[in-house]
Structure formats: C-alpha cells, structure tokens
Image (cartoon, rainbow, N blue to C red):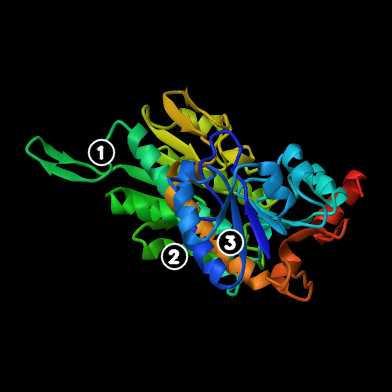
Amino acid sequence: MRIAVPKEIEPGEARIAIVPETVKRLGKKGIEVSVESGAGEGARFADDEYKEAGATIEPSVEALLAAADVVVKVHRPTPEEIAKIREGAALVSLLYPLLNPDLVVTLAARNITAIAVDSIPRTTLAQMMDVLSSQATIAGYYAVILAAHGLPKFFPMLMTAAGTIAPAKVLVLGAGVAGLQAVATAKRIGASVEAFDVRKVVKGQVESLGAKFIEVDMAEDAETKSGYAKEVSEEYKRRQAELIHRHIAKSDVCITTALIPGQRAPILITEEMVRDMRPGSVIVDLAAEQGGNCALTEPGTEVVRHGVAVIGFLNLPSRLAVHASQMYSRNMERFLLHLAGDSGLKVDFQDEITRGCVITHKGEIVHEKVKELLSRKGGA
C-alpha cells in the first residue's frame, strides 16, 4: 500500500498528517509513504528526517497524488487537490461531511473512497484513532494560554509584600475533551475554576480536576449514546441561560467549547451577558469554527465589546504544530493499520469503525446520515 502525504495548503495551517516516527513504524508493516517536499516544515520536520525514516520525498504534488493508493491529510481537500487524486484511491482526512455535503458529492463523482476521521466512532477500540480528541486537547490547553495572555491580571493567588492577590476566576462552558483540558490547565496555573455541561455524567470528571461543577436544577440530561451533547428543551435552555449569566458576571475568563455535531454551535453567551462581565475580562470561543458560542464572536479574529475581549481564533492546534502533528499522526497510524489490506485500505462495513467514518465508496455516498442530509436537500 502506498500512502501520500501532501503539504497542507489551508492558509495558516502548519500541521502535517504523518510525522517521521510514524513513517518508520508503517514501513515495518510494509506500507510505503511518500511525502511532498517541504510538507513538514511548518511542524519542524525536515525532508531529511522523512528520508531517514524511510519515506520517499516527491517534489511534484501531481505525481505524488496520482501514484497513491491512500492520500492522508489534515484539512479537507480543495477541488484542485481532488482533481489530482487518482480515481479509485482513498482519501483520509478531516471532512466534516454534514457541514460540507457538496464536497461529498464531488468525492463520490471522482470515485474516491472518502474517509472522514472526524466521524470515527468514539468507542473504546477507536480511542487511539480519535483525532477530534487529540486536537481538542491542544485547543483546550492553548485557550487558557490565550486567556492568560489577554487578561490584565494574574491567574494564580499570590502572597506578596504588597498584599494578597486573589486568583482569577475561570468559567468553562462545555466539559468535553477541550473543556476538561482547559479546566486542568487553568487549575494548574492557579485559577479558581468552574465548569458547566449539559451532560451530568461529566460532573465527576470536572470535580476530579479540582474545579466546581455548576448545573441546571433539572433532571434532564443531554448526552447521546455516543457521548456527544444533543439539543435540550426550551425550559432547560432558559434555566441554563440564567445560570450562565449569574456565573459569567463573576468571572474574569470564560472558555467556551460547546458543539453539536453537524450543526451550528449553540449560543450560550448573549450580548447582555458580555455587557455584565467585568471590564478587561476575556472570552475564548473554541466553537468559533462552527459559528461560536458567544453572540459577539467574530470567527477568525479578536474583538473587544463592552470592555471584554472576545477571541474567536480558528485552528488553534496549528499554533502548536509539532505536538499537534505528532498526536494526529499517531491517530492515523492506528487507524491505517486497522484498515490496512494487501493493496490498499479494506472497506468492511461489518466493522463499526469503518461503517462510522467511510462517507463515499465506489462512486456512491454510503454514510447513512450524509445520505439523509443530501436527500432532504434534494441532492441525492
């Protein structure tokens, strides 16, 4: 099996899908890896490191993609990249197919087996393949660093000759992987931390990190069977808004991470809530990629509204490209070895992991949720 790793062309992207250590381990399994020249530079991996690990360096992206059985990327491909991938090959990358149905149609038309690693089921077997979790860990950590940089206060409590400095108060909305990492990082540097999530099962995880879990006084729980959050009732939303408003008004920092797969991120912070925050406070909106959890978030930038900095930067994992690439690459290694066949990836729909993340195969859209979406849109 021949794997191709092209350079990421998304503006600002520094990650690479496969790092040299993974090339070496794949090589021991008889899997050949070709890398576009210079593809690893953003993550500080030189061509010579790839050569030493056993990869072939290809200066021509056209030749690279045309010869590959499997193309492995971080970002979804552009139409120009898709046109260069040979028909019948497989593509493994982040695709977010429910948000990009037109991309899915294009991949099917090119007879490319499209595999969305963002759709890998969150099961025990697939844990080591879970790129969303690995990259969310980085985003949660870096969100705290951004907040600390923007906040005109110390994070930890300090005993000084000038008196005692109280710790910063941090509120984390959403206690998934990114949220829990934000909680842990904020606690690690001395902040007083509270966290909220619609899924009551995470209460123990939040408290185990030394933070306080705040919750709506209702029996309703919003966790799906796969562990994601789902929509809640209107009454729950009303009480949730009141709870968040009370706590955000006392907070110096709010980090938001709430996402619903395939949908726009829910608005958790209204303009009124921002107006009631302390001047100089910071909001870091990790849901900016899907519109944002704050009504005032402008995806891709930082704005100041009512004296509060609202940070909606995109693609935070790329800012820590070395470790982000290493983690993504290790996920890819486990995933590729799970699906590896004699001459390419074997697509076995009896396998739960395969069934969950293969979107197109043999010129057809095979993922049920994507087919349903396109059917509603009249596109399939």
Labels 3 and 1: the sequence-earlier one: 1
Q: Residue at x 37, y 56 (%)?
A: 184
Q: Which amino acid, by three-letter code, is at mark 3?
A: Met
Labels 3 and 2: the sequence-earlier one: 2
Q: Residue at x 41, y 34 (%)?
A: 282
Rendering coords of residue 212 (x, y %): 38, 57
Q: Which amino acid, by three-letter code, is at mark 2?
A: Gln
Q: Which residue is mark 3?
A: 332
- Please rate how many residues cluster around mark 2, counting C-alpha atoms within 10 Å: few if below 14, some from 14 to 19, many from 20: some
Left or right: where does residue 380 sit relative to residue 251? right
Residue 230 quadrant: bottom right
Q: Residue at x 77, y 69 (%)?
A: 347
The residues bearing labels 3 and 2 have C-alpha atoms spaced at a distance of 27 Å
Q: Which mark is residue 290?
A: none
The residues bearing labels 1 and 2 have C-alpha atoms spaced at a distance of 26 Å
Q: Which mark is residue 205?
A: 2
